[in-house]
Structure formats: C-alpha cells, structure tokens
C-alpha cells in the first residue's frame, strides 16, 4: 500500500535540480521543457479516461519520484505533464499517479524498480514525469502504464499511447482517447495528457 506522505521538498524544486542531468543534456532551453501547461478547458472533461488492463508487469511499492531516469540510462528523453480532473472538471490535488513502462529495448525490470515510480499532483492538480520513450515488444505498441487515484477516490488503471506509431492500429488494447499529445523540443520529447477520473 502506498502511503500518501508528500515529499518535504516541492516537486518543482526536485525537478529543477535533476532535470536532464542523468542523460547529460545541457540546461539551455530547460524552461520550455518543464513549464506548467495551461489548465484544460471544461470541454476536456467530457467523459472519464478509459480504464485498461494492468498487464503482467505491475509491481507495488514503487519509489516516490518525479524522474525515472537513472545515471547511465539510454533512450530518448520524455517529459510528460498534465492535470488530473474530476468529471465536473475540477482540478484534483494530491492524486496518486503510479507510472511504469518498458526500457528502450522493450524490456521491463521485474527484479527492481527501474522505470517505475509514483508521485502526487500538486495543489493545482498538476503532475510532471521525467522519463525516456518506452520501447516496444512483440504484440504491443509503444505505451506507458499508470494507476491514478485521488485521495479517498476510485482507482483508475490505464495505459497511455503515442501518436503516429505503426503498431497502434494492430494493438488490440489501443484507444485513441488515450493518446498523448506529443511534440519535439531540442532537449526532449514533450508530452501532455490530462486524466479525468470518475
């Protein structure tokens, strides 16, 4: 069971201190990579984010952290950001988000917690995840697993997908509503996804 304790240092301070360091990218242009996006319009709350299977590789007790990148880790840097909202389009602070995904070769770490971690939304319901672009493996398209749970609320287990992936149309679990809005920056791939919970 994950405990709801928040880090004493703010997520923004932690991200400022660690952003891009493991891959050795220079700090120039950093602001655009981690800036908080505008809150979604009410239209974005039409319908809850679809649930999907947990899959065989979930591990409980992931470490609390906003960056999954570790020293020496290869791969294309990805910064994923967004909000958690209620069906009434209210931003939800303190929501648990537990992320896990394959490495750049499509392999999951089932012995430890590489590319696994949880965090909580800030006072504005906002989150930022620093990681790498997951690889693909046989039978699946590129994806990130996540569990989303507001304090005292229902758990949403789902998966996020990437646009323009050739395997999207052949993956039986793929849902367009779970596509990350993605753009490229000189330093990283920048993704946006807003979760709507019932």
Image (spheres, grey):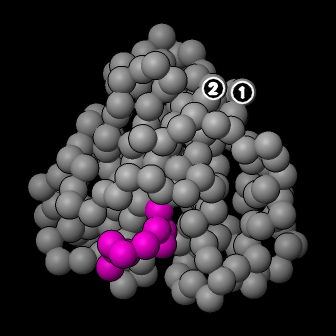
Which quadrant holds residue 90?
top right
User: Which numbered marker is on residue 171?
Assistant: none
194 horizontally vs 176: left or right: right
Q: Quadrant of the C terminus?
A: top left
User: Which numbered marker is on residue 93?
Assistant: 2
| Of 174 and 16, the residue lying toward us | 16
- Judge whether residue 25 is colored magenta: no
Q: Mark 2 or mark 1, which is nearer the start of the sequence? A: 2
Measured as percent of width and height from the top left, residue 77 is found at: 59, 73
C-alpha distance separating marks 1 and 2? 5 Å
Q: Which residue range is magenta in the image?
A: 107-116
- Secondary structure beneath dot 1 equals loop
Which quadrant holds residue 163?
bottom left
Image point (38%, 52%), residue name: 60
- Judge whether residue 115 is colored magenta: yes
192 horizontally vs 22: left or right: left
- Secondary structure beneath dot 2 equals loop
Residue under label 1: 123
Inspect this view and state whether residue 194 appears.
no
Callouts 1 and 2 close, C-beta under 8 Å: yes
Image point (61%, 29%), residue name: 94
Q: Quadrant of the N terminus?
A: top left
Which quadrant holds residue 154?
top left
**Relative to 36, does residue 43 appear above or below in the rendering?**
above
**Relative to 25, does residue 188 appear above or below in the rendering?**
above
For label 2, the crowd category at 10 Å Cα-Cα, with few meaning under 14, some 14 to 19 and many 20 or more, is some
Measured as percent of width and height from the top left, residue 95 is found at: 54, 31
């Amino acid at each position: 069971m994950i405990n709801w304790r928040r880090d004493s240092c703010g997520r923004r301070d932690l991200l400022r201190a660690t952003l891009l360091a493991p891959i050795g990218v220079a700090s120039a242009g950093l602001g655009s990579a981690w800036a908080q996006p505008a809150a979604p319009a009410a239209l974005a709350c039409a319908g809850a984010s679809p649930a999907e299977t947990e899959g065989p590789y979930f591990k409980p007790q992931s470490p609390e952290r906003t960056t999954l990148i570790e020293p020496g880790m290869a791969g294309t840097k990805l910064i994923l950001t967004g909000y958690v909202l209620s069906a009434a389009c209210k931003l939800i602070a303190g929501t648990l988000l537990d992320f896990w995904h394959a490495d750049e070769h499509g392999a999951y770490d089932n012995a430890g917690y590489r590319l696994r971690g949880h965090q909580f939304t800030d006072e504005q319901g906002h989150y930022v995840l620093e990681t790498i672009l997951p690889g693909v493996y046989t039978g699946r398209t590129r994806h990130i697993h996540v569990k989303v749970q507001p304090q005292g609320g229902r758990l949403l287990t789902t998966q996020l997908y990437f646009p323009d992936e050739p395997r999207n149309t052949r993956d039986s679990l793929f849902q367009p509503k779970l596509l990350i809005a993605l753009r490229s920056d000189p330093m990283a791939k920048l993704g946006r996804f807003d979760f709507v919970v019932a």
